[in-house]
Amino acid sequence: MGFPGVWMTQSESMVYRVVPKCACSTIGQIMFYSDHGRFFDGDIHDADDGLHKWAAEHSQTPITRNVSDHMSYAFTCVRNPYARILSSFFDKICGIQRNGKRYRGNLVPLLTQTYGVDVGGPEGRDDFDQIAAFRRFLLFARDTIRFRKPMDPDIHWSAVSSHVSTFIVNGGTYDKIIWTESFNDGMREVLEEIETPHRIDLDAVPRFNESHGHGPKRAHPVEDYFDDLSAHLVYEIYKRDFDLFQYDPDTPADRRPKGEIDLDAVHAKLGD
């Protein structure tokens, strides 16, 4: 199976397991800058050189060699499940993508017809009840993850632990897992452990939120989108994420972790 979702700097200073909707654009740009002294001009996901990516065939051999022998510092980044699933909804379901089309073509019409999800009309310009639409989408996300119906789960709302686990199962070892909620602190710890061709001033790094502007602005605080039922669904879907990455399932308003991540436990529980 190899190491899907893995990026590595060309200098092999660091290895990163991408987790969608967890600051991956910013991390990729930091990696690119650390090698080249400049940011990639565009969405880092579109970069086909300057950064090793598992999706590029020529990068698979160096990535496999490095990760299998644990030659470089390896890390990933996680996010509170409440905020992440909500972000996925506004970006991928409500938003018009960079190509001017809806995400995955017929996905939104399927949601509208099967789950009654209203996202503001075909162009996404009409007013709609964000809370009601999100809660219906959450039923769909649960069905894709638990039952793989009416489709397999999308990478943007499949569990963080599922992404993190492939790296471990196939022979990788994490040196650090950082939280999106304290990104600069975590990324600074990563950079302090490695040597890079170019120094990075984290305080000066912009946030490369490539999904910004894709969808309507969130009209309510995070916690307003989750009643008792929807919070229960989130916990049902993402229980392992809450447990391993130390997030509070009982308080959607509190996005920060409540304890330290036990890396040994992560490797043991996700390595089966």
Image (cartoon, grey):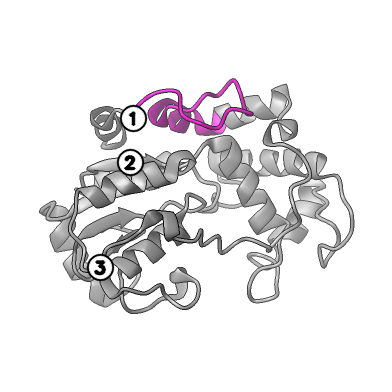
Helix or strand or loop: what does disc 3 sit on? loop
Image disc number at residue 261 = 1
Can you say whether 265 is above or below 77 in the image?
above
Q: Residue furthest right?
A: 127
Residue identifier under label 2:
177
Q: Is residue 123 left or right of residue 29?
A: right
Foreground of the two, 46 or 35? 35
State the predominant SS element of the stretch in magenta. Answer: loop
Q: Give coordinates of residue 106: x percent, y percent.
A: 70, 65
- The residue that appears at 64% across and 44% down in the rendered structure is 86
Q: Is residue 215 left or right of residue 209?
A: right
Tell me the CA gap for discs 2 and 3. 23 Å
Q: Earlier in the sequence, mark 2 or mark 1?
A: 2
| Disc 1: CA contacts within 10 A as few (<14), some (14-19) or many (>=20) | some
Q: Earlier in the sequence, mark 1 or mark 3?
A: 3
Res 221 → quadrant: top right
* Number of the front mark, 2 or 3: 3
Helix or strand or loop: what does disc 1 sit on? loop
Q: Are the residues flagged by discs 1 and 3 in contact, CB closer than 8 Å?
A: no
The segment highlighted magenta reads: 236-261
Residue identifier under label 3:
198
Say which amino acid is labelled 1.
Ile
- The residue that appears at 79% across and 39% down in the rendered structure is 131
Q: Are the residues flagged by discs 2 and 1 in contact, CB closer than 8 Å?
A: yes
Say which amino acid is labelled 2.
Ile
Q: Is residue 140 left or right of residue 130?
A: left
